[in-house]
Amino acid sequence: MLIDLNENPTCTECGLCREVCPVFQIQQREEYSPRGRAMLDSAGIQTLVFYQCTLCRTCRIVCPVGHDPSGETLRSGLIAVGEETPANQVMIANIRQYGNPFGPLAEGEIPKTLTCC
Ligand code: SF4
Ligand code: SF4
C-alpha cells in the first residue's frame, strides 16, 4: 500500500500500535496508547494526555493503514485552544527569549534542568 504522508488515514482501532508504544508500556492505560489517542481525537476530545508521547513515531511505522496518532498534530490542536502544560509554556518562552529550551546560559555552561512538555 502506498501512503500519502500528507494525509492521516483513519484509525481502524486494531491495536497493533499499543504493543510498541513506550508510553503505553509504562502507563498500561488505553488513553496513553496510540490507539487511545486516536479514539479521543476522533471523538473531538482534547486532553493534556496528548503531551504524554515521546514523538518516537514507532506507532506509525507499525500501523497497517499509516495513521499517525503521535503528539505533534494533537498538541497543536491543544495549543490552538490554549491548553498547554506549564513546562511547555516555560520551554517555549525560553526558546523565544534565549534561543534554547533551558533559559539563560553562560558560555559553556551545562544546563542543570531540562524543561520539557
Ligand atoms: S493507529 Fe493504526 S495500529 Fe493503532 S489502532 Fe489505529 S489503525 Fe491500528
Ligand atoms: S509516537 Fe507517541 S504514541 Fe506513538 S509509539 Fe511513540 S510514544 Fe507512543
Image: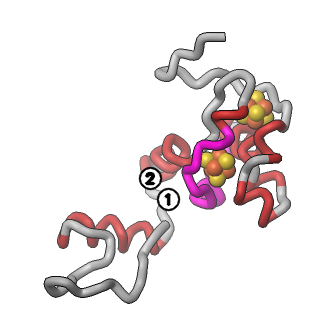
Q: Tell me the residue at 72%/30% (across/down).
A: 63
State which quadrant residue 10 falls in. Answer: top right
Q: Amino acid at mark 1?
A: Glu
Quadrant of the rendered image containing residue 70: top right
Image coordinates of residue 76 in percent, x first then y, are 45, 46
Query: Is 35 positioned to the left or the right of 49 in the image?
Result: right
Position in image of residue 95 (x %, y %): 26, 66
Name the magenta segment's main secondary structure.
Answer: loop
Amino acid type indicated by mark 2: Ile
The structure residue drawn at horizontal position 48% and vertical position 62%, both measured from the top left corner, is 84
Instruction: Tell me what residue is drawn at x 49 percent, y 45 percent.
Output: 72
* Pointers 2 and 1 in contact (C-beta within 8 Å): yes
In the picture, the quarter occupied by the N terminus is top right
Q: Is residue 106 above or below residue 24?
A: below
Residue ID at (50%, 68%): 85
**Could you tell whether 1 is left or right of 75 in the image?**
right
Residue 109 in the image, given as x and y percentages of width and height? 23, 87
Of residues 86 and 8, the one nearer the viewer is 8
Residue 108 is a magenta residue: no
Side of 33 where 53 appears, left or right: left
Q: Give the vertical position of 113 relative to 91 (above or below).
A: below
Element type at marker 1? loop
According to the picture, the residue beneath numbered tag 1 turns out to be 83
**In magenta segment, residue 58:** yes
**Disc 2 and disc 1: Cα gap in Å?**
5 Å
Query: Which residue, given by chain and number where applicable, does mark 2 sit on?
Result: 79
Q: Tell me how many marks there are.
A: 2
Q: Secondary structure at mark 2?
A: helix
Q: Magenta residues, as a range? A: 44-59
Horizontally, is 81 left or right of 61 in the view?
A: left
